[in-house]
Image: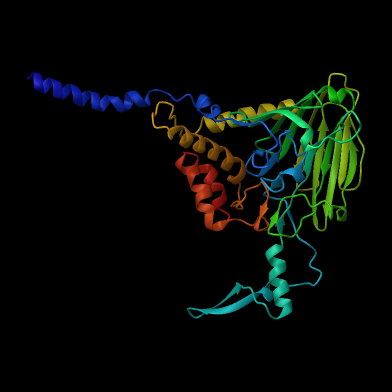
Amino acid sequence: MKRLQLKTGWISLAILLPSLLFSQKIDRKAVVQRHNVAVAKIDSLSSLSVGNGNFAFTVDATGMQSFPDAYAKGVPLGTQSVWGWHSFPNTEKLGIEEAQKTYDLEGRKISYTVQPKEPERARKAVEYFRVNPHRLQLGNIGMEIKKKDGSLATAGDIENISQTLDLWTGVISSTFTVEGTPVKVLTVCHQQKDILGFKIESPLISSGRIFIRIRFPYPNGQWKDVGNNWNDAIDGNSFLEKCYGGYIIHRRLDSAKHNLSLSWQTPAVDSTVNKNYFLFKPVGNTSGLCEFTCSFNKNETGFNSIKFSELLGNSIKSWQKFWLSGGAIDFSQVKDKRAFEIERRAILSQYLTKIQCSSDFPPQETGLTYNSWYGKPHLEMHWWHAVHFAQWGRPELMEKSLDWY
């Protein structure tokens, strides 16, 4: 009888143990934030990104895109969307059919694009339609900081760097010094609209030594475009329109066009360098504060005004909703020394694929960071980019891109 009671007790424990374990709620915020990303130096392989799935913005250690050339050989500083595309003018009026060859397949005539070397016109057609259309770098947004002697600070002048990406809120916080003077920058992206927000605090603003720079690089026409082709940028035709509360930059590049609405919560004046190089100087500010938002619009629209505080609240609320949805893991009690790294990769991959791969279109190989293969969708790997959303209990993020087929 005792033996039967003992067995019954073990059976009951075996039944109850899983429910006892699963009844302990995971502290999701603690799990996510223990993998916040920290950067302590100018490192071209340590770029950080904010985004919403349709749009992404990648920054250097200043929290903006102040030194794109210094990051060109690592993870470049891109500003890209699912809607921003450009084609070089088709001056020879090449047709896609000139790049195709017809094959017999089970009694049907099927045309495929091939790579003929001859005739010359067919080769040109193949090359043109391989390159065009290509995803467009929507604009480089950075700071120009003047040193005491009046020269511009370089990447080597940025010291005492402490930068953190808070995965729970989607906010990048960056602090550094220039010649001993501190600068603090908050960077955030709206989670439903293609809008960026920046909050900059520094005595350098009060002394008129910080400028906000917006530049438009020209596409390089290569399979990898890191967005720093300034030599040909003069070929564009952008112009500035002053509005109540800010500015609109109308960008025109061949047949492509889009707008940037700049909404300033603190006053700023423009000091345009050329039609693809705009400078804005925060003025009348003794507190050393600059807040502004930048809205990217595909179509001709009016001025889009949103405050930094609103955008910050949107990011915090939206990311909290994301992390509290679907599945979660907590390996903090696992004794295997590999557990922490597995958990870290799981958290970071969820963040990165949310901001890079959760749109209505299959992503390119390098997401929305920069162009590889001209920004074309990476279809042979789309499965890996998407199926994990369903496995984590967020099937709606996977389903969005399936309609593309």
> What colouring does the structure picture have?
rainbow
For the point 61% across and 41% down, which residue is it? 355
Question: Which image quadrant: the C terminus?
Answer: bottom right
Q: Work out whether 347 lies above or below 277.
A: above
Q: Which one is nearer the viewer's eye here, 46 or 232? A: 46
* Residue 298: % across, % down: 75, 48
For the point 54% across and 40% down, which residue is it? 349
Q: Please tell me how many numbered marks the rendered image carries.
A: 0
Residue 197 in sight here? yes
Q: Work out whether 250 lies above or below 145.
A: below
Question: Which image quadrant: the N terminus?
Answer: top left
Q: Work out whether 33 lies above or below 275.
A: above
For the point 53% across and 29% down, which residue is it? 32
Q: Which one is nearer the viewer's eye here, 323 or 164? A: 164
For the point 52% across and 24% down, which residue is it? 30
* Residue 269: % across, % down: 91, 33
Query: Is 405 left, or right, of 68 in this rendering?
Result: left
* Residue 144: % across, % down: 84, 35
Query: Is 285 left, or right, of 347 in this rendering?
Result: right
* Residue 21: % across, % down: 35, 25
Q: Which one is nearer the viewer's eye here, 179 or 310? A: 179
**Direction left: furthest residue:** 1
Residue 326 in sight here? no
